Image (spheres, rainbow, N blue to C red):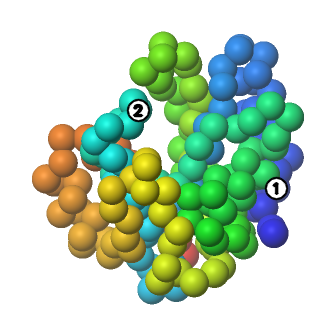
Amino acid sequence: MTCAPHPAEFEPIQREASAAGVRCVVGAVLVNPRGEVFLQRRAEHVRLFPGCWDIVGGHVEQGETLCAALAREIEEETGWRLLEVGGLVDVFDWTGGDGGLRREIDVLATVEGDLTRPRIERDKFDEARWLEEDELRRLAAGSAESGMIQLALRALAMRPG
């Protein structure tokens, strides 16, 4: 697995969050060779962001690096393996339903595995699919909560070529 930006670039973000007592969350905007982005729609019954489209990711566990957490979350949520972290898309803070502050670190990433058959966590997500840029724009226009869709569009704009 290659992490670029180098994991050392992640260390100050994680260290600052830890010093402030803020829990880190990692997210991956996964892009396939056709330039499509993988998104999952959160189930209506989940506590955080029910019914919203989301990227792959989750909380960083105690003692885990951001890159290790990203690889673990990708494997847990899809069954795929992280190949490369391509670039930092966004870092922002948000408050969860439990009132706890989170610092989210979202990156552009590529994965390997059977990209046609993600292993979806059906207790957390209702739907998952690869979306082209035009489809992302349509979803964003028709969604009251389009934060992660907008993030995916920013990540696509970062890609070379």
- Dot label at residue 62: none
Q: Residue at x 24, y 70 (%)?
A: 135
Question: Where residue 96 sits in the image (x, y, percent)?
Answer: 47, 23
Residue 61 sits in which quadrant?
A: top right
Looking at the image, tell me whether mark 1 or mark 2 is earlier in sequence order. Answer: 1
- Dot label at residue 6: 1
Q: Is residue 154 visible?
A: no
Is residue 55 rendered to the left or right of residue 9? left
Instruction: Identify which residue, 27 or 155, lies in the foreground.
Output: 27
Marks 1/2: CA distance?
30 Å
Question: Where residue 143 sits in the image (x, y, percent)?
Answer: 18, 48
Residue 156 sits in which quadrant?
A: bottom left
Q: Residues within 10 Å of mark 1 (few under 14, many from 20)?
A: few
Q: Is residue 96 visible?
A: yes
Instruction: Identify which residue, 48 or 3, lies in the foreground.
Output: 48
Is residue 71 rendered to the left or right of residue 129? right
Quarter occupied by the N terminus: bottom right
Is residue 53 rendered to the left or right of residue 112? left
Question: Where residue 5 sits in the image (x, y, percent)?
Answer: 75, 57
Marks 2 and 1: in contact by CB < 8 Å? no
Q: Looking at the picture, which amino acid does disc 1 mark? A: His
- Dot label at residue 48: 2
Residue 15 sits in which quadrant?
A: top right
Task: Name the secondary structure under disc 1.
Answer: loop
Relative vertical location of residue 4 with respect to residue 16 in this rendering, above or below: below
Relative vertical location of residue 15 with respect to residue 19 in this rendering, above or below: below
Q: Looking at the picture, which amino acid does disc 2 mark? A: Leu
Task: Name the secondary structure under disc 2.
Answer: loop
Q: Residues within 10 Å of mark 2 (few under 14, many from 20)?
A: some
